[in-house]
Image: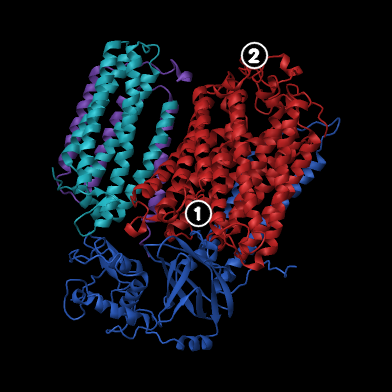
Amino acid sequence: MVGERGIMSAHVVPKKTYIAVWITLMILTVVTAAVSRIDLGKVSAIVALTIATGKALLVVLFFMGVKYISQKMTIVVIVAGIFWLAILMVLSMADYGTRLWS
Amino acid sequence: MATSPTPAAERENYLNTEYGIRSWLLTTDHKRIALLYLLLITFFFFIGGFFALLIRLELLTPAGDLVQADTYNKLFTMHGQVMVFFFLIPAIPAVLGNFLIPIMIGAKDLAFPRINLFSWYLLVIGGLLMMYTILTGGADTGWTFYPPFSTAFAKSQVVTAALAIFVAGFSSILTGLNFIVTIHRMRAPGMTWSRLPLFVWANYATSIIQVLGTPVLAITLMLVALDRLFDFGIFDPQRGGDPLLFQHLFWFYSHPAVYIMILPGMGVVSEVVSCFSRKRIFGYKFMALALIAIAVLGFLVWAHHMFVAGISLYAALVFSLLSYLVAVPSAIKVFNWTATMYKGSISYATPMLYAFGFIGLFTMGGLTGLFLAALGVDVHVTDTYFVIAHFHYIMVGGMVMAYIGGLHFWWPKISGRMYPEAWGKLAALIIFVGFNLTFFPQFVLGYLGMPRRYWQYSPEFQVLNVLSTAGATILAVGYVLPMVYFLWSMRYGKVADENPWGAAGLEWMTASPPPIFNFDETPVVTWEAYDYANLKEVAVEP
Amino acid sequence: MGMWVFLITEIMFFGGMFTAYMVYRYMYYQAFVAGSEKMDFWWGTINTVVLICSSLTMALAVRSSQIGQRKALVVLLIITMLFGCVFMGIKAIEYTGHWKEHQFPGTNFHFEGPDPQHVEIFFSLYWAMTGFHALHMLIGIIIVGVIAFYSWRGKYGPDYYNPVENVGLYWHFVDMVWIYLYPLLYLISHKHGG
Amino acid sequence: MFQTFPVWPERASTTAGSVDALFIFLLTLCGLMAIMIFILILVFAAKYRRSRGREAEQIEGSNALELTWSGVPLLIFMGIFVWGAAIYFKERTPPQDSAEIYTVAKQWMWKFQHMEGQREINELHVPIGRDVKMIMTSQDVIHSFYVPAFRIKQDVLPGRYTVAWFRATKAGRYHLFCAEYCGTSHSGMIGDVVVMQPAQYEQWLSGGPAAPLAQTGKQLFLSLGCSTCHRFDVQGRGPNLMNAYNRPVLLDDGRTITADENYLRESILTPAVKVVSGFKPIMPIFQGIISEEQLNALVAYIKSLNQSPEGTAGTRNTPTGSPTGQPQMMQVQ
């Protein structure tokens, strides 16, 4: 993309880091798959989503390189995206969650 | 475009640098793309306006006599969809924003010129789909696509209409993306955030909404299409789907979409008021902050469209409260524009007349918003003509006034020619009168209880409807006039110099029309925005 | 930054569906459990692994472009594409299975159980969410292919690797969507078959 | 050519007065506000018009002023919010002893079922001075029950009940509109609300031969075989429905909810969604098997079980006894 040529910092991440992240992701996948076979009731969903978020964080920070990004603005953009999704979800649930209140 | 030799044409500018269809359709120059947008949305403005006239003519009498009920339903649906997605949303950002933002920040072009052209083609494709929809019978769901009517009952072109809006939505997203990156990355040396004209701030705030809101509309319309094409039943209450979920997702975008329309208008008015008062805008920081605040808070209020829809009582309370928060920054803006005029040196050129109109009508629209946000009153007036009047005061009285005013203001920059001032003033007056006559009676109709989207109505509503229709014909004349004299002025208008208004801002420091890369050399900014204190007075006839 | 802004629109695009999922799961939890039992646990898990591997190769591909290893770049991009194709293949197998089992909402749906209607909603969301995800995968595979072609022609190197990086960001994002889809669709029930 | 035309809608319910009060307050407040701004603009435009020899005075802004004109409006807005919310809260909370009328909306008509058995289409008779609770659902798309003279409006949704209530104060004939766009004849989906003096209303009621709604419901309850599982004497395979309405009920997923009309409705149509704790999801699905009107009769019958053991008396709902404080399972035995 024209405007960005050469602007991104060329931080080269060592291969080892990527492989370590990959191994962690694999382990977390096995863990979440294994845990799902045990009935933990309502905790199941929390565990599954926590692990998924952990995995997503690893992908964002390392594979997508956010950990090494020099521009604060990009981080603001990402946080904004998550924040807006939270607005959508939380305020929608403000309706559904309180419909049965009397 | 003017092809005959003119004084301005002696110097190379973006208009005369190349000729021929190819040089336009393959251009990546933001100024040329802006003009492409101008053509496209003017076309759709008159299509949508034509539908509006037919609606008003049908409502001249209480009986449904001019068109069939189904035709009427399609008319207001297509009026809404065309006007919202193919005129109001692209209008100021894609035409004026596209043209001005790079110049105002001292850049050669937008950050992604090819994506900019691609956005235009997306809007063309969306527009073609919309025209296909219209020509093959149109959709009759209302512009809001509420299921289960849209998914299971409507027997019209719902899917193509949804697809048209989907594609147009991506055009809007890419424009927003382009603006955000441009404003971050392409500012000239010295053009700090606190020196940005409010027009740029306004488009920045708009872009945030476009980027974050539009995709939700896109997926929601896709789910409607899935329901319709494959009978998925995601919104089908007979199978446990919740039609209110659609409404939540739809308004999550479509309420902020109102701010997509009005925020750039606020930007235009800030420029115009400041220029014709020859004063720095009052409370610049608060004005910029208010724009961003509106963009953010605008996302927290969507369910105020749903107070009678069957949402929970508690959700309604929360959304009503939040709706009042977004009214505060809007109030700030009106007060600041007024204060800007205080002790100014005010001239009444056409753009300023539109700005007066904007402030007045936006104030009316905004204040009636307080009625609608008040839960108890909203129950009575929602889905009536009160709401119709309210949002037309914002969208037509506000946004369209600002857009046309902005076109007048920057017309010398765009075309290198002056429009005829007397005609401009006349048109502004006609539009103002016509607008109020059209929409003010609708407030009364609404409180009396006339529901919206009614093809035939009870006879006691007739007098007010006749007034409204009369106003609409006046309004139509008012809208045709500028188009005629703008075209006329391209050949016969007085040649404009660099800065005919004596306005501050980088766009007035380059030639009219600007050269291909906007500036002969990259400007270095050493002054604050609206630096009228250090600007020589220019003689403009009052 | 342009790519990141684009990705947040993608967040909101999928976010609409995740919101729908959340609302319906809240309303019809037991039907969602019943629907999830019909998911193929093993295919879902294998696909998760496949995508994580593809993300690794994609990350390494971007790294190769940064340090100018053209051959490694091309090879890694092709491997990424292959992983993507494997994912799509497995998805196709799953889709065929669901179709045969009458688990396609609307026209081809039948479910034995106390609450078939709301299981149907689960499947509507399953098809919509994985369908749009698969569409993104398909687009991703094509773009990676294009980038691989240009890499082979030697267009990218340490001084210009932005397109590779942007495609990488897109690819990781699509992977991330799946990281959430996997537990939300496949792992609700603790007694899944397969 | 034209008759004189109204500028203010008729006021025929208790709600209408309170809505009008807030509306008039807002008109005054906003009117003053708008006039103030317009006058300021006009005065500035005239007084500071461009003239030779006078230059604009540059003023940067004023934080104090900005804070004032954000703070003061905010306070006023909060006041309006509370006022509006108070009215709405009342509108959304039907009084305990309201008379109930079941409503089914469809493209493009309104169908009403009175508890006494009378059925009406596009015309609704109600007495002055009694709280009336409309329990409404739609057979197809979303409609909206709107009576401008009462200042009430409530969307009528397919797949669930929504509720509106009013207390009429003035005899007469008033518009009933569908206010949510519903297709071709949306503007033809209109009717009349006829408000009558109580005596006349009683007379009107006695005109019909129909059986009370709960009675119809009881017959359905028997003929559909509901009574084989939902027994009143011994523990059946389904919960005992005696005194079930409006009571807290413990579900098999551990939640406790109130057995309101919507719960009864959902449990008849798709019983497996919220199963009462201790029971199996074995009840057949009635979605698509019974009509909305039959469903209303069944719900009316189950509700009538709160007052008389036989459930035959069911004329009008009288307030149920004080609800028990703690959650209590539906099956009594």
Chain drawn blue in the picture: D
Q: Left or right: where does residue B542 sit relative to residue D27?
A: right
Could you tell me if residue D86 is visible in this image?
A: yes
Question: Chain under label 2?
Answer: B
Where residue B430 sits: x, y (%)? 75, 46
Q: Left or right: where does residue B342 sit relative to residue B38?
A: right
Q: Which amino acid, by three-letter code, is at mark 2? A: Asp
Between D76 and C147, the one nearer to me in the picture: C147
According to the picture, the residue beneath numbered tag 2 turns out to be: B520
Q: Left or right: where does residue C115 sit relative to residue B94?
A: left
Could you tell me if residue D60 is visible in this image?
A: no
Between A9 and B207, the one nearer to me in the picture: B207
- Which mark is nearer the camera, 1 or 2? 2
Number of the label disc, if any, that sits on residue B304: 1
Task: For the C terminus of chain B, give its image quadrant.
Answer: top right
Could you say which quadrant of the image residue B357 lies in? top right
Compared with residue B253, is residue C74 higher up or lower down, i.e. above or below? Answer: above
